[in-house]
Amino acid sequence: MFDFLFNGGFMFILIIAGIAVFLNFVPLALWISAIAAGVNVGIFNLVGMRFRRVPASQIVLPLIKANKAGLDVNVNQLEAHYLAGGNVDRVIDALIAAHRAQIPLSFERSCAIDLAGRNVLEAVQMSVNPEVIETPVVSAVAKDGIELKVKARVTVRANIDRLVGGAGEATIIARVGEGIVTNVGSAVKHSDVLENPDFISRTVLAKGLDAGTAFEILSIDIADVDVGRNIGAALMTDQAEADKRIAQARAEERRAMAVAKEQEMKAYTQEMQAKVVEAQAKVPTALADALENGRLGVMDYYRMNNINADTDMRKMIAGSSPENSGEKGSNPK
């Protein structure tokens, strides 16, 4: 009797352990939910997900959602996308939204967009409900030199076919800003832009700025136009100031050259005066030498003195002293 009870208890424990192991590998509740929803998910598929470390709930629940929405997807496709690093639930939600909005979107395209790092669900929602992108204030200058500050609103819709590899919102903003600068810069007067701001939006929109981007531009509206500084006058003022500084520098250069030339002439004059003084100092010695050697007679010396005295007297009569004879007066006739 004891052996029977012991063997029976051991078998009961084995059965409980077997059921626990089975439930550990097989999410029974999830399997029952799939069967109840009419989704064909085999028990061995769930066990295989367990061994491949794929959360069964992240595959089965989106599969049930897709099956109820009428989408044609299977377990292998969802599991492959999960193993590739994608978001299965977001892909299914995007497919359901596109199916309801009658937007052509295949499962492979949706997976490619998701794996590319873009939010495929937001892209589908943007295709249904376009988004408005507001550009920062763009500063542009018309031909008359007046600055205009323009702000625009760009209405865009996601382009599903160009989401993979297409440029983003930053490219749209940059291209619209470039178009605004070009149109304002080509205007003869800033008042022309103020009178017809829609000319900017029409011209910019006609350039096809959405080429190569993940969006389709629906409209470009000028939200605000403000008059800024007179850039042309400021540039002319700066140019005049620069010309003035150049002229001052050249005048200073000429003045420095003139001062240097004056100093050079003074030095030359002083040198000549020194030579004259030196020559005058040699006159008595030369006279003495001439008298001694007979080249100059005594009478010749007296005549020369008489001539000098007569010359000094004439200068005094004319109103000049002998010391200033070279500076004032004139020789009498």
Image (cartoon, grey):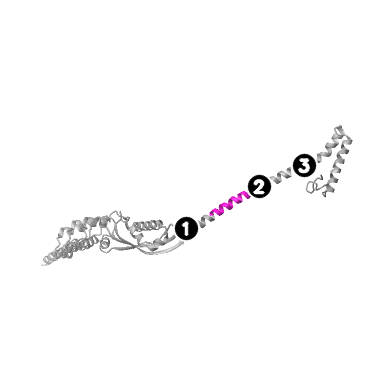
Please tell me which residue is depicted at 87% across the width and 41% down the height of the picture: 306
Residue 16 drawn above or below residue 108: below
Residue 257 in the magenta stretch? The answer is yes
**Residue 241 drawn at (x, y percent):** 54, 56
Q: Which residue type does callout 3 highlight?
A: Val
- Res 148 → quadrant: bottom left
Residue that badge 3 annotates: 276
Inter-mark Cα distance, 2 to 1 = 42 Å
Please determine whether, in this image, residue 308 is positioned above or below residue 160.
above
Picture disc at residue 232: 1
x and y percentages locating residue 93 in the rendered image: 23, 62
| Residue 257 percent coordinates (x, y) | 63, 47
Q: 110 or 44: nearer the eye? A: 110
Q: Which residues are magenta?
A: 242-261
Mark 1, secondary structure of its residue: helix
Instruction: Give the amino acid type for the residue marked by disc 1 in the picture.
Output: Gly
Query: Which of these two is toward me, 185 or 71?
Result: 185
Point 30% across, 63% down: residue: 131
Nearest to the observer: residue 332 or residue 45: 332
Q: Residues within 10 Å of mark 1 (few under 14, many from 20)?
A: some
- Examine the structure image and report whether residue 247 is included in the region drawn in magenta: yes
Dot 2: within a 10 Å radius of its alpha carbon, few (fewer than 14), some, or many (20 or more) residues? Answer: few
